[in-house]
Amino acid sequence: MKDLKKIAIRYITRRFPIDFIATFPWRMILQGKLSPQHLRLLYLCRLLRLLKLSTILDLQKFQTLLKGIYRHRLNNTIHKNNNVRESNREDNNKIMQQIYIMYIFRVLRLVVFILFLSYFLGAMWYIATDLITNKDEDKFTFFNEYELYKYPETKRLIIVVYFAFTTLSTVGFGDFNPKHEIERILTTFILLVGVAVFSYIMGQFIEILMNLQTVTADNEDSENLSKWLGLLAHFNKNRPLPKEMT
């Protein structure tokens, strides 16, 4: 698309609302009107930009890009050696290599999805437990029990993301757990989401393995057939085989 007007209309109707909400200086405008704890909730607006990750990890776009790269490599190879065009004994377009890369990309998408969901829920959990504590050091909460206020922000992030990941996966080692009643209610919802998410991910992962096994078996049969035809051509002194045999 080269029409600037169409590009502008497409951006305004699709991406502009997300970029506007994520980059607008809400904290600067609402400074003094809200408490510091409530101002932290505005950081969640920035997480809307993570929706752009779906376009980066789009399977169809990646497949088109991958095919374009291999097509360009094949054209360069043919340009250097024209005999490659007529060769039918070698996978010059690296079809199996492309298939393996696509399956690796699909697995990578699942891993990235889990990590970003854990990060998002961890950030939500930290904001929630901080709001519940409300600077009350005597309140029995996750924030006070594990003394998060003593740690630097990086370590706090690691703790809450680790807690979110273990809760999502329904493993729950028990080293970190909710303390306040509201925290337990939030954890219940996270567990429900975790069951659904990990069931979907395991289903996708099993499907990837089954498809890969099928493709690999078909490819081995094709390679064996090609070797057999090549052997026949060799004993036939590289003369064309009868059509009845091919």
Image (cartoon, rainbow, N blue to C red):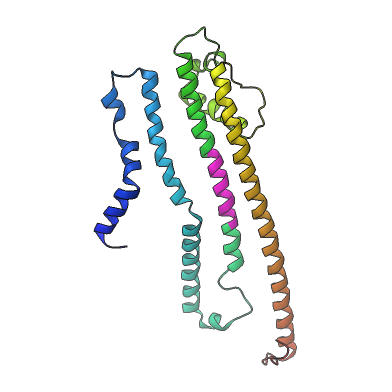
Rendered residue at 59%/40% (across/down)? 197
Rendered residue at 26%/26% (across/down)? 29
Rendered residue at 47%/73% (across/down)? 76
| Occupied quadrant, residue 142 | top right
- The picture places residue 130, in percent across and down from the top left corner, at 47, 18
What span is in magenta?
103-115
Quadrant the C terminus occupies: bottom right
Q: Does the magenta stretch include residue 77?
A: no
Q: Does the magenta stretch include residue 109?
A: yes
Query: Along the horizontal axis of the image, is 240 left or right of 93?
Result: right
Front one among 143 and 202: 202
| Occupied quadrant, residue 30 | top left
Above or below for 148 versus 188: above
- The picture places residue 28, in percent across and down from the top left corner, at 27, 26
Front one among 51 and 83: 51
Above or below for 82 versus 64: below
Query: Along the horizontal axis of the image, is 21 left or right of 103?
Result: left
